[in-house]
């Protein structure tokens, strides 16, 4: 799903590229820490078609979407053939609920300014602009 998220942002990555791209790999490396949160959507055949996950980072990781030590950074992706059908909204809502139940005060993410469908999704779900970083809007969704 990280590859799908990269493709949706206009980046071309393959699974073999991930260990050599620390900026992207940090979103999945050593998955399963107690603070990691995630949901996966499967199609009728049991194949994954979407996921939303959030991880806590510290300032040293250098992410433009870093807000503070208590705000996880969200990543969300769907496969191309299911986009535009509401799956992203469902995943986002489930992850927000999961983060709220885990006591997280907010979630943050970076979204490319040209990705209008994603911009619309986040704004419709109550996300607001925190800052900008290059070609990305850094959005935040307060949960408490």
Image: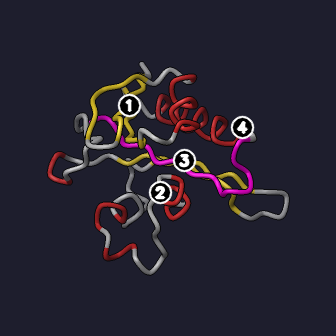
Q: Tell me if label 3 and label 4 are in contact, CB under 8 Å.
A: no
Q: Which residue is mark 1?
A: 139
Q: How far is the residue under mark 2 from the one under mark 1?
A: 19 Å
Q: Earlier in the sequence, mark 4 or mark 2?
A: 2
Q: Considering the numbered disc 2 on the image, is that residue within a helix, a strand or a loop?
A: loop
Residue 76: in magenta span: yes
Q: Nearer the viewer, mark 2 or mark 1?
A: 2
How crowded is the residue under tag 2: few (<14 C-alpha within 10 Å), some, or many (20+)? Answer: few
Residue under label 2: 10
Q: Is residue 124 left or right of residue 63?
A: right
Residue 85: x and y, percent?
A: 75, 41
In the displayed orientation, state which residue is furthest to the bottom. 16
* Secondary element at tag 1: strand
Report which residue position mark 3 lands on: 52
Query: How far across and down, in percent of the image, does residue 23 sit?
Result: 30, 61
Q: Which of the two discs, 3 and 1, sits closer to the camera?
A: 1
Magenta highlight range? 70-84
Circle number at residue 125: none
Measure the alpha-carbon separation of dots 1 and 4. 20 Å
Measure the C-alpha gap from mark 3 to mark 1. 15 Å
């Amino acid at each position: 799903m990280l590859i799908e998220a990269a493709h949706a942002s206009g980046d071309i990555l393959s699974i073999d590229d991930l260990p050599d791209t620390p900026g992207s790999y940090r979103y999945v490396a050593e998955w399963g820490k107690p603070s990691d949160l995630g949901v996966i959507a499967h199609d009728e055949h049991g194949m994954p078609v979407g996921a939303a996950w959030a991880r806590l980072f510290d300032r040293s990781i250098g992410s433009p979407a870093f807000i503070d030590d208590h705000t996880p950074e969200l990543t969300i992706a769907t496969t191309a053939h299911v986009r535009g059908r509401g799956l992203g909204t469902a995943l986002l809502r489930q992850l927000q609920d999961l983060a709220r139940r885990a006591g997280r005060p907010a979630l943050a993410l970076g979204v490319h300014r040209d990705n209008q469908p994603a911009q619309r999704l986040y704004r419709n779900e109550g996300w607001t602009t925190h800052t900008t970083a290059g070609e990305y809007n850094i959005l935040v969704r307060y949960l408490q």
